[in-house]
C-alpha cells in the first residue's frame, strides 16, 4: 500500500529540524555552564579579596601609624611657665 | 583575557570596599597624667585636688584624659585644666593621621587662632575674664591628637594661650 500525504511527525527524517535540536541544546547548556562558571569565579574573586582586605587592614593601619609617627620629631620639653595668675 | 580582567576588577572592588569600611583601633596612647610635670599642674591650677584620669575610646580612636581642678586659688579664683591625649586608627575610610580624622577642635566662626606646634594647632577663647575665661586648644602631631581645655578666672588671654600651649607641648615632648 502506497503512502500518500506528509510523513508522520515522529518518523525520523533527514529534513526534520527536530532531529538537529539535540546537539544545539547541549551546546547551549555548555555555554550557559561556562558563563555561570565565569560569573562564579568573578564573584568568588571579589569575596576572597574582600576577606583578604578585611584581614590585612589591621596590619596595614599599624604600618601606617608606625610610618607616620617615625617621620616626626617631638618638640622639646618646654620651660616651666610663669604663673598665669595676677599678670 | 576578558575573564582575567573581570576577575581582577572584582578583586580590586572587593578589596577596596573592605579596606574603605575597615575600622581599626590604634595602640593605646600612654596615660597623659604622668606626661605633665606636677610643677605645671601646680602653676596652672594652684591648690588642685587629686588628678582625675579616665579613658575615652571611640571607633578607630583611643584616648585618655587627665583633669586637675581647684576649688579656689589664693586670689579667690578657680581654675581647671583638662588634657586629653588621643591616638587614631582607621574609621569611615579615613586613615590614622590626626588631621585626616578632624582631630582639631574648632568653632564655626572666625575666632580660631593658629599656633606653631606639631603638625597644626589652633585655639579659641570663650567666656569672660571675671566669671571664667576658657581656652580650647587642640594640636595634631602625626597619629596623636592633644586637646587642652583650660579655664581660669582673672587671667589674661596671653597667659591662657601660653599655659595651654605649654601643657600641650609638655605632652608632645614625650611622644
Image (cartoon, grey):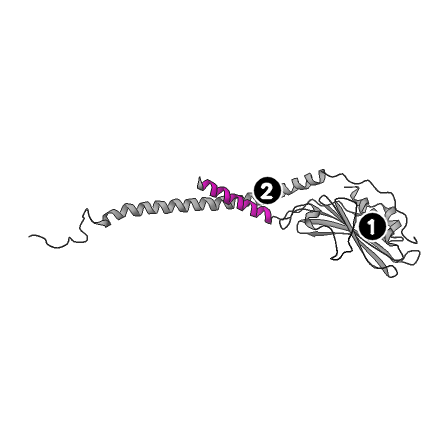
Whether the residues at callouts 1 and 2 have beta carbons within 8 Å, the answer is no
In the image, A40 versus B3, the foreground residue is: B3
**Residue B1 coordinates in the image, percent (x, y):** 44, 39
Bin the neighbour count of mark 1 within 10 Å (Cα to Cα): few under 14, some 14-19, many 20 and up. Answer: many
The magenta span reads B3-20
Q: From where the camera sits, is residue B137 visible?
A: no
Bin the neighbour count of mark 2 within 10 Å (Cα to Cα): few under 14, some 14-19, many 20 and up. Answer: some
Please name the predominant secondary structure of the magenta segment in the image: helix
Give the mark count: 2
Query: Mark 2 = which residue?
Result: A56
**Residue B128 coordinates in the image, percent (x, y):** 85, 60
Residue B13 highlighted magenta (yes or no): yes
Protein chain holding label 2 = A
Vertical arrangement, residue B142 with respect to residue B108, above or below: above
Label 1, label 2: how far apart the Cα atoms are: 39 Å
In the image, B138 versus A52, the foreground residue is: B138
| Side (left or right) of A33 relative to B149 | left
| Side (left or right) of B74 relative to B67 | right
Q: From where the camera sits, is residue A55 visible?
A: yes
Protein chain holding label 1 = B
Query: Mark 1 = which residue?
Result: B164
Residues indicated by labels 1 and 2 sit on the same polypeptide chain: no
Which residue is depicted at the point 56% across and 46% down?
B16
Residue B123 highlighted magenta (yes or no): no
Amino acid at each position: 500500500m502506497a503512502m500518500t500525504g506528509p510523513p508522520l511527525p515522529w518518523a525520523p527524517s533527514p529534513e526534520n529540524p527536530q532531529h538537529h535540536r539535540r546537539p544545539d541544546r547541549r551546546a547551549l547548556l555548555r555555554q550557559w555552564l561556562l558563563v555561570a562558571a565565569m560569573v562564579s569565579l568573578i564573584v568568588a574573586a571579589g569575596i576572597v579579596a574582600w576577606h583578604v582586605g578585611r584581614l590585612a587592614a589591621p596590619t596595614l593601619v599599624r604600618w601606617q601609624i608606625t610610618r607616620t609617627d617615625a617621620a616626626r620629631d617631638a618638640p622639646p620639653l618646654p620651660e616651666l611657665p610663669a604663673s598665669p595668675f595676677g599678670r | 583575557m576578558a575573564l582575567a580582567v573581570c576577575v581582577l576588577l572584582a578583586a580590586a572592588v572587593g578589596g577596596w570596599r573592605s579596606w574603605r569600611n575597615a575600622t581599626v583601633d590604634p595602640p593605646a596612647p600612654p596615660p597623659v597624667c604622668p606626661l605633665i610635670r606636677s610643677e605645671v599642674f601646680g602653676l596652672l591650677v594652684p591648690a588642685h585636688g587629686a588628678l582625675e584620669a579616665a579613658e575615652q575610646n571611640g571607633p578607630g580612636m583611643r584616648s585618655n584624659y587627665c583633669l586637675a581642678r581647684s576649688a579656689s586659688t589664693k586670689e579667690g579664683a578657680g581654675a581647671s585644666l583638662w588634657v586629653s591625649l588621643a591616638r587614631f586608627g582607621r574609621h569611615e575610610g579615613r586613615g590614622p593621621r590626626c588631621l585626616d580624622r578632624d582631630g582639631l577642635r574648632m568653632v564655626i566662626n572666625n575666632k580660631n587662632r593658629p599656633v606653631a606646634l606639631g603638625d597644626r594647632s589652633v585655639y579659641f577663647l570663650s567666656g569672660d575674664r571675671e566669671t571664667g575665661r576658657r581656652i580650647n586648644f587642640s594640636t595634631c602631631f602625626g597619629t596623636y591628637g592633644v586637646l587642652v581645655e583650660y579655664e581660669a578666672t582673672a587671667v589674661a588671654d596671653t597667659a591662657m594661650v601660653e599655659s595651654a600651649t605649654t601643657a600641650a607641648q609638655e605632652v608632645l615632648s614625650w611622644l
